[in-house]
């Protein structure tokens, strides 16, 4: 497959010394540039410049300090919004700790995370305010809830707008206490993020200011982003919070806030971004929609011919992909040039399709414990079968490699977390004696030095014959069946409890299921699974094929949750 060699070199950026300097530098160099665009109720699309953004950080930070919590644990729970980002940066620039809360957590998990994380105040939207009222007696250490949608104060439930107004008045009347806060120790905990793993209980990942700044600065040395982005992924997740929001500030980019996944196509048309960060599940949806549209319009052969033509022309230095496939680009807003994909493996077939029509899709790899980015492909060396090159600030090694040089990926460097909050035992378990973090992911390094992910350590299947199988490999093949939406490969056990043979559960196109019936479609699916895997060794063949009629249980980053035995929940 011919890879793209036309892209933007990483821009020369001014180094920043701390998180206060991150926005101050953006104001110095691009103060009048639009930092954020978003839909505002009754206002249409609102634009906020970097200068305006910094002023509002000062007002909010001053209000937090006046309330007495600028050295405390400041939490935020809610839908993606400009206010969420404002709380985030204000907390980061205080002397306290920012604690993002997964907006989709059930009440019991909210109680556990809020109490374990020692949260002092919580910023939230209306839906989360209602949840916190339900569990109020179980989270006694929280002093105040500052609510984005509330107009009036009521006991400990405060209006965000009034809170901001008070901070503005204090700041403009000479209260510079927040502005003058020191960031002397960059190794102290600055963010406390609770993981939403696919198995097991959440743990509080402690990230320092040094961890965060290292990710922001070294990430942009390895690969660049464009000037206008669409912000799609949940803000409570480190991928979007650090690699998305903070990297955009350092790049002085304009970030457009996607207010709903249901509106992503409309927002692509509205904001016309040049880049966005996504997870594979979202890329899969966009890919399937485009393929269905191409087929529905009878243009499959036209697109295939166009791909062959443009690939030939690129060999002689002529790139006309964006002209030839202008209609497809228009469906994505017209300006989209680059998509950074992380959080789970992406099928190479999808990356190749977008590459063929003129959109760079770069795979990255990360984990919350690494702030979260470890490696990423760039515009010039982009192999979708890998997750790219490690950042300059880390060392990556493969522990206990097998005959194929595959082993556990271990990372050491500036982005690796301080440890798990109030959990020394769990912290000790994930670090080697010489200080490497055990990611729990299996993989290998290519000859060029790129990381290739094989699968998750906890998902590995070991058959009775001793063969090791990574289900993610088989799921990638099965995911290529057009009517399969999602699938999970796992082991079935024999009477002795041994992992004896492989099974797969698939969710399929509901219209096709209704049309053909479960029994007939299951028989067809079994044939198609066999065909998809026919080139693999016998021990990697799936013997049990099941159509799943209920949705898979997923995390907020769209990963399917697995039970302890590897099967879907």
Image (spheres, rainbow, N blue to C red):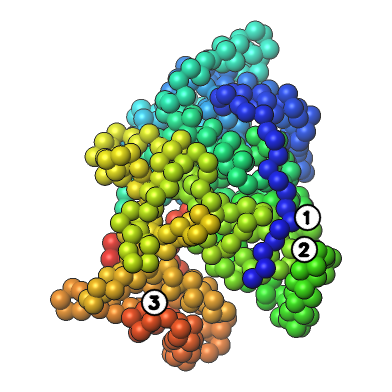
Q: Position of residue 398 (x, y in %)?
A: 37, 54
Could you say whether the residue bearing mark 1 is in a helix, strand or loop? Answer: loop
Q: Which numbered tag is attached to residue 504?
A: 3
Most foreground residue, 34 or 305: 305
Residue where numbered disc 2 is placed: 329
Q: Earlier in the sequence, mark 3 or mark 1?
A: 1
Query: Quadrant of residue 172 in the image?
Result: top right
Q: Give left or right: position of 282 versus 14.
A: left
Q: Which residue of the protein is positioned furthest toward the front in this rendering?
A: 447
Residue 529, above or below 133: below
Could you say whether the residue bearing mark 2 is in a helix, strand or loop? Answer: helix
Labels 2 & 1 near each other (Cβ < 8 A):
yes
Residue 268, above or below 58: below
> Can residue 367 be seen in this snapshot?
yes
Q: Position of residue 403 (x, y in %)?
A: 33, 67
Q: Earlier in the sequence, mark 3 or mark 2?
A: 2
Q: Earlier in the sequence, mark 2 or mark 1?
A: 2
Q: Give left or right: position of 3 versus 407.
A: right
Q: Position of residue 59 (x, y in %)?
A: 63, 20
> Mark 2 and mark 1: span between their CA atoms?
7 Å
Instruction: Please tell me how crowded label 2 is: few (under 14), some (14-19), or many (20+) other residues with Cα within 10 Å.
Output: many
Residue where numbered disc 1 is placed: 335
Most foreground residue, 522 or 128: 522
């Amino acid at each position: 497959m011919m890879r793209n060699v036309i892209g933007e070199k990483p821009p020369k950026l001014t180094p920043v010394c701390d998180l206060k300097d991150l926005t101050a530098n953006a104001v110095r160099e691009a103060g009048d540039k639009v930092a954020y665009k978003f839909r505002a109720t009754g206002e249409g699309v609102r634009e906020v410049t970097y200068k305006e953004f910094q002023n509002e950080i000062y007002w909010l930070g001053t209000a937090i300090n006046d309330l007495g919590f600028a050295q405390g644990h400041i939490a935020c729970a809610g839908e993606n919004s400009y206010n969420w980002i404002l709380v985030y940066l204000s907390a980061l620039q205080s002397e306290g700790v920012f604690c993002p809360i997964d907006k989709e957590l059930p009440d019991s998990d909210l109680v556990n995370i809020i109490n374990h994380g020692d949260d002092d105040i919580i910023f939230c939207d209306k839906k989360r305010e209602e949840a916190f009222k339900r569990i109020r007696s179980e989270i006694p250490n929280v002093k105040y809830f500052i609510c984005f949608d509330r107009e009036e104060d009521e006991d400990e439930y405060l209006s965000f707008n009034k809170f901001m107004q008070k901070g503005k008045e204090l700041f403009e009347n000479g209260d510079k206490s927040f502005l003058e806060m020191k960031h002397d120790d960059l190794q102290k905990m600055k963010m406390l993020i609770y993981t939403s793993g696919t198995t097991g209980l959440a743990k509080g990942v402690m990230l320092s200011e040094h961890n965060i700044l290292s990710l922001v600065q070294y990430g942009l040395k390895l690969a660049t982003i464009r000037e206008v982005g669409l912000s799609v992924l949940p803000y409570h997740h480190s991928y979007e919070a650090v690699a998305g929001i903070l990297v955009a500030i350092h790049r002085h980019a304009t970030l457009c806030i996607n207010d709903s996944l249901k509106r992503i196509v409309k927002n692509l048309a509205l904001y016309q971004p040049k880049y966005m960060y996504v997870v594979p599940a979202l890329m899969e949806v966009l890919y399937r929609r485009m393929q269905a549209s191409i087929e529905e319009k009878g243009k499959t052969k036209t697109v295939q011919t166009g791909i062959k033509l443009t690939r030939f022309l690129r060999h002689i230095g002529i790139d006309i992909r964006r002209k030839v496939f202008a209609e497809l680009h228009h469906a994505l807003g017209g300006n989209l040039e680059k998509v950074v994909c992380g959080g789970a493996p992406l099928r190479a077939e999808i990356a190749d399709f977008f590459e063929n029509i003129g959109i760079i899709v770069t795979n990255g790899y990360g984990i919350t414990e690494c702030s979260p980015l470890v490696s990423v492909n760039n515009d010039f060396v982009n192999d979708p079968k890998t997750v790219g090159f490690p950042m300059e600030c880390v060392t990556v090694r493969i522990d206990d490699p097998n005959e194929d040089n595959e082993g556990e990926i271990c990372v050491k460097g500036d982005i690796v977390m301080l440890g798990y909050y109030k959990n020394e035992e769990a912290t000790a378990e994930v670090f080697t004696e010489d200080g490497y973090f055990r990611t729990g992911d299996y993989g290998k390094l290519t000859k060029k030095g790129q990381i290739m992910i094989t699968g998750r350590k906890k998902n590995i299947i070991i058959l009775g014959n001793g063969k090791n199988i990574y289900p993610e490999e088989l799921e990638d093949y099965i995911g290529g069946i057009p009517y399969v939406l999602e699938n999970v490969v796992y082991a079935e056990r024999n009477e002795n409890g041994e992992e004896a043979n492989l099974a797969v559960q698939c969710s399929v196109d509901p219209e096709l299921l209704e049309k053909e019936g479960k029994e007939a479609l299951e028989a067809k699916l079994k044939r198609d699974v066999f065909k998809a895997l026919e080139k693999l060794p016998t021990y990697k063949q799936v013997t049990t094929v099941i159509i799943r009629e209920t949705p898979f249980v997923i995390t907020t980053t769209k990963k399917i949750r697995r039970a302890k035995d590897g099967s879907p929940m």
